[in-house]
Amino acid sequence: MAFEIPKQIYSGAIKSVTIGKGGKAITLGGETSYPFYVFEGAMPHVPRIAMEVWDKNPGDEWADPALAPFKDVAGDPVAWAQKCIKNYGAEAIALILVSTDPNGDDASPEAAAATAKKVADAIDVPLIIYGTGSVDKDAEVLPAVAEACADKNLIIGPAQDKNYKKIGAAALAYNHTVIAFSPIDVNLAKQLNILLGQLGVKDSHILVDPTTGGLGYGLEYTYSVMERDRMAALTQEDDKLQLPIICYLGQEVWKVKECRLTNDEAPHLGDQTKRGILMEAITAVDLLLAGADLLVMRHPEAVKLTKSFIQELAG
């Protein structure tokens, strides 16, 4: 008698969210089973990868191996984004508005909006716009970006429980998608999704950011929360958790000491470039297995490794 693998029946499904416009728009979500469990359900849209671009030169804020592929364009976000697409096959771009940090350059909302529009006009793949996480400043900056890039179907965030009204209203007014950010907690993630819905933002315009930890630096907490999120969505029919997940992992991985220590400083850790790439790729794979639909990554070689994993499992 032939052995048959027992299969689980899922009563829920992840809703689909389309980002970007035109021929290179991307649809996320749609899964009817746990990540890559294609023997139990459907995975109509494989996870995608966006490459990180800063609106200013990162300088020594980035480890040398991470900055090396972009040194020639690091001061120009438009050229940087175009290089990611042309040279490294980026499926989406995540523009990080670092210059708006109130504890840093404190750039104006108008300046940030102008930069975002230049990048949006120069590329044909979906564009994600990330603020700095400053509740008050993001509430000023992201609505300005939303207006300047009206109807380009940007993905803007992070929208948090203290500023979701301004950011959500701007996304609603100018037809963008919102990143709902919550601090590693399933209930808080669900609550924010409900609040955005009450504001009028449709589920088809919300991505969930559960907060991402890097390998060895909080990844296990992120993984656990994402796992519980997917269980609730697929087996408990919790419709407010049936949304695609975005993970901004590049910054979390490359800021840790294991990625920043040079070969001379830590010869026992092996080659700095290889170790950083592997730490980013391993973090990415773990997040994919937990349920991520969209990854924001930094190093082109880590992106390449992760894409090969997706292709192998989604086959």
Image: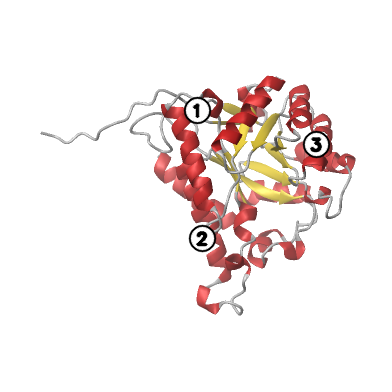
Image point (49%, 55%), residue name: 282
Task: From the top left corner, tell me how far across and down residue 172 is, in percent.
Answer: 74, 23
Does residue 195 appear in the picture of this structure?
yes
Q: Position of residue 220 (x, y in %)?
A: 49, 51
Q: Which residue does the numbered mark 1 point to in the structure image?
A: 14
Q: What is the three-letter code of the residue carrying label 1?
A: Ile
Q: Nearer the viewer, residue 273 or 311?
A: 273
Q: 57 or 226: which is nearer to us?
A: 226
Please identify the quarter of the rendering in which residue 313 is found: top left
Q: What whole-number distance in Å separates the C-alpha atoms at marks 2 and 3?
A: 35 Å
Crowding at mark 2 (Cα within 10 Å: few <14, some 14-19, many 20+):
some
Residue 139: x percent and y percent? 80, 36
Q: Assign a secondary structure to mark 1.
A: loop
Horizontal placement of 61 versus 49: left or right? Answer: right
Disc 2: which residue: 278
Q: Position of residue 99 (x, y in %)?
A: 82, 51
Image position of 141 with respect to 152: above or below: below
The answer to which of marks 3 and 1 sits earlier in the sequence is 1
The residue under label 2 is which amino acid type? Leu
Is 296 placed above or below 239 here?
below
Decide: few, some or many residues near mark 3? Use Cα within 10 Å; few <14, some 14-19, many ≥20.
Answer: many
Tell me which numbered mark, 1 or 2, is placed earlier along the sequence: 1
Residue under pointer 3: 139
Residue occupying the point 61% across, 63% down: 256
Q: Nearer the viewer, residue 65 or 204?
A: 204
Give the number of the disc on residue 247: none
> Between marks 1 and 2, how big is the CA–CA gap?
29 Å
Contact between labelled residues 1 and 3, with CB atoms less than 8 Å apart: no
The amino acid marked with disc number 3 is Ala
Pick whichever of labels 2 and 3 is earlier in the sequence. Answer: 3
Given this view, does label 3 or label 1 mark the residue nearer the observer? 3
